Structure formats: structure tokens, C-alpha cells
Image (cartoon, rainbow, N blue to C red):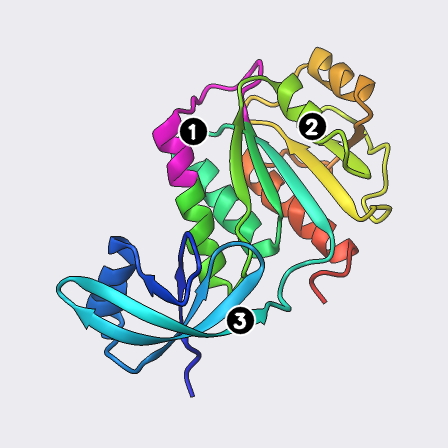
Amino acid sequence: MAAPKRFFVEEIADEVVLSAQEARHAKNVLRLTEGDEVTLFDGSGKEYSAIVTCADKQGVTVHVVRENVSDREPKTHVFLLIGALKGDKTELVVQKATELGVSRIGVFSSRFCAAYMNENKLERLNRVAREAAKQCLRASVPQVEYFATLEEALAAGKDCDTKLFACEFLPSGERNIAQTGASVVAVVGSEGGFSEEEYELAETLGYCGISLGKRILRAETAAIALVSVIMYEAGELQ
């Protein structure tokens, strides 16, 4: 039996009207009709079993019948901070980080960052996170935030147990990634990397520099690889 189709909703109630985008997908792609079973999630960590009660030109309405707690959310809280990347590379990082289980994502501008952010791009990134959460069966959706400076981004991770700062000019890491706490903030730069001054700033704020090996990785590769290693060492990929 196929798993129920999943839809993101902003707010849960006994009767829920799907958004126009979700309704089009339900009717035109999935061909759902009255009586079909679906799963709703609102990004809070809970899922809701529901039945389609109406699917017509006016939209799709579902009736919620049961609340469930998802067992797919990681116990380790990972906050990824990534420098804004050119083209659609930031979207790729958001998508894969969501699939891997990050809890929060921050995009920042730094000295050598050549990309820029605006409200439309930020909304697009949050939409990518919602779609990725839907695809990988997560019930929580990481919020994507923007920080205008590296200092603001670093300050946002001050309460995390483990603070990792990936830097390409370090000969070796100061911290073993396996030694992580219940919450981790991981920082990866944009295509231009970081300056010595930015690394020193991170050190003053309690971040430990780490190396990702002898090869120079693309920024998007470095972000995805680092999150993967953190999740593996935390036991979240077992």
C-alpha cells in the first residue's frame, strides 16, 4: 500500500483548506479525490492524518482525524551557517541539509562573498526547505534566516554546545568532529572562503577551526559533507 501523500500547511485545524499551490499538486498531479487519505505537517514536528472531503475547482479541503508525533527527527540539533552562494547553489545546500536533518539554516554575507540576498530569495529558500522536508518525510522544517554580516551569523550560534568553523587554510583541525554535544553550529564560507581576520573573529566567539581535508572543496560540497559527517558521528545516520 502506498504511503499517504504529504502536504505542508501553515496552521492545523479540524478542517483545513490546502494552499493554492498544494491544491494544484493534489488535484492535477496526484489526482486525489474525495475519500483519499493524506498526511499534513506544519513544521512543528507533528504529523496529522486526514481525509479529503472536497476536491473541486474551488480547492481542496481535508478533515483531520488523528495527530501523530514523527519519529524521523534527529536528536542532535544542528545549525548550519553558510555564506551566500552564486546561482542556485544555496538552494542545493538548503535542500540537502534539510534532508540530512539540520534544525536551522543561516545564510550570511562575508568579506569575500560575491552573492547577494533579498526577501524574494529568502522566501524561495524557505520554500525549498519545505519541499525537501515533504520529500524526505520530515515533520519539522528548518527555518532559513539571513544575516547581513558574519559577526551576526556567528553570534546566532553562541548557545550551541559545539561551534565548528570550517576553514580551507588550516593545516589540520583543532576539534575532532566526533566530539559533538547535543547542539552543533557549523560554519562554511562562500566561494571566496574566509580571511584570517574572520577566522580570528570566530575564535574570539568560541568557535573551533576544522579542516575538511587536503583537497579544496566547492563551498556547496563542503557544507553538505560537513553536515553529513556531523550527523554520522552523532549517530543520526544509523
Asked whether the beta carbons under mark 2 and mark 1 sit within 8 Å of each other, the answer is no
Taking 125 as reference, is 68 above or below it?
below
Query: Residue extending furthest front?
Result: 14
Q: Secondary structure at mark 3?
A: strand
- State left or right for residue 30 relative to residue 139: left
Say whether disc 2 or disc 1 marks the residue closer to the N-terminus.
Answer: 1
Residue drawn 38% across the image and 28% down it: 119
Taking 68 as reference, is 224 above or below it?
above
Task: Identify the residue under disc 3.
Answer: 67
Task: Identify the residue under disc 2.
Answer: 168
What range of the chain is rendered magenta? 108-125
Structural crowding at the residue carrying mark 1, measured as other residues with C-alpha within 10 Å and reported as few (<14), some (14–19) or many (≥20): some
Q: Secondary structure at mark 1?
A: loop
Mark 3–mark 2 distance (CA, rounded to whole Å): 46 Å
Q: How far from the left and from the top, in percent, is residue 12?
A: 44, 60
Instruction: Report if residue 232 is visible in the image.
Output: yes
Q: How far from the left and from the top, in percent, is residue 226?
A: 67, 44
Q: Who is closer to the viewer here, 31 or 117?
A: 31
Q: Which mark is residue 86?
A: 1
- State left or right for residue 157 relative to residue 96: right
Say whether disc 3 or disc 1 marks the residue closer to the N-terminus.
Answer: 3
* Amino acid type, callout 2: Glu
Q: Secondary structure at mark 2?
A: loop
Mark 3–mark 1 distance (CA, rounded to whole Å): 40 Å
Mark 2–mark 1 distance (CA, rounded to whole Å): 19 Å
Instruction: Report if residue 218 is visible in the image.
Output: no
Q: Which mark is residue 55?
A: none
Taking 106 as reference, is 28 above or below it?
below
- State left or right for residue 141 relative to residue 53: right
Quarter in which the C terminus is drawn:
bottom right
- Based on the picture, tell me whether residue 116 belongs to the magenta stretch: yes
Say whether disc 3 or disc 2 marks the residue closer to the N-terminus.
Answer: 3
